Image: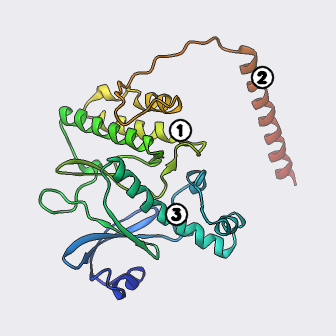
Amino acid sequence: MKTPKRILPLVEDGLVDEVISQLMSGKEATVYVVRCGDAIRCAKVYKEAAQRSFKQAVQYQEGRKVRNSRRARAMEKGSKFGRKEQENAWQHHEVDALFTLAKAGVRVPEPFGCYDGVLLMELVTDENDDVAPRLNDVAMSAEQALEDHAVMMHYIRLMLCAGIIHGDLSEFNVLVDEYGPVIIDLPQAVNASANNNAERMLLRDVRNMNLYYGQYAPELIETQFGEEMWGLYQAGELTPETELFGVVEAIEQSADVDAVLDEIKAAFEQMQENQARIQAAEED
């Protein structure tokens, strides 16, 4: 196919020899199958910030550190240079996450480098050397669902032990090859210890996996691996070898009725103020 404009510099530098086909187009990037010498790989071309449809990117970036103080100040001010550096940080964050997770034992595509907004990485294939399907396109037995769910919980635990939460994990961000699940798409990966949304995102990631595999093994739907992992992580007791059971004991505590009533009253007063402002605006 015709070489996309963003990949041309890689062709000119000899990093890519041929663009074979477009693999997919998502909310933050378009992925192509490319030939690099004798190897078939994929090139992930990140979309510019104005073209990305990834919502609430700011909450994912909370807690990410920028080593260069000049770049950090520019990013905070939102200058042209700062916006460019923000884009570079967003793109290279996935490369860093891939290397970190591979070292931790999580199955992810092998990265080969990020060049001007284009990430070259391993093309995950099946036993026939075709592009591996997404989890969403795979049907399985109850036994296979239980096995693969256990693998995914293990990977999520390893990720959390490495200080990373995927943040957007679903059946659309997992490939399945002959050896099992492979986690993909990590530009939004969250810093587990420095992001205020970390717990919520971890629980959502685990819930998505429970619901998907629960289609084939319903007993997985109500498991509480996310809550169990987060509780152990906060207590400093989570390790790659920690045995998980998917059950969390409920802590019984008496409800503070007065506090609940105060919150209801405050919410009602806020609603009245909002309605008054809307009515005033309509009259004006």
Q: Position of residue 83 (x, y in %)?
A: 62, 70
Where is 69 relative to 259, above or below? below
The quadrant in which residue 139 appears is top left
Query: Gap between marks 1 and 3, in whole Å?
Result: 21 Å
Query: Gap between marks 2 and 1, in whole Å?
Result: 25 Å
Instruction: Tell us which disc is closer to us: 2 or 3.
Output: 3
Where is 221 relative to 181, above or below? above
Callout 3: few (<14), some (14-19), or many (20+) C-alpha neighbours within 10 Å?
Answer: many
Q: Nearer the viewer, residue 57 or 110?
A: 110
Q: Earlier in the sequence, mark 1 or mark 3?
A: 3
Callout 2: few (<14), some (14-19), or many (20+) C-alpha neighbours within 10 Å?
Answer: few
Q: Which residue is mark 1?
A: 200
Q: Which residue is mark 2?
A: 262
Q: Which residue is mark 3?
A: 90
Residue occupying the point 36% across, 30% down: 242
Instruction: Tell us which disc is closer to us: 2 or 1.
Output: 1
Query: Gap between marks 2 and 3, in whole Å?
Result: 42 Å
Q: Position of residue 160 (x, y in %)?
A: 44, 41
Is residue 165 shown left or right of residue 11? Answer: right
Residue occupying the point 22% across, 79% down: 37
Q: Position of residue 263 (x, y in %)?
A: 74, 26
Q: Earlier in the sequence, mark 2 or mark 1?
A: 1
Name the quadrant of the N terminus: bottom left
Whether residue 49 is visible here, answered yes or no, is no
Mark 3 lies on a secondary structure that is: helix
Mark 2 lies on a secondary structure that is: helix
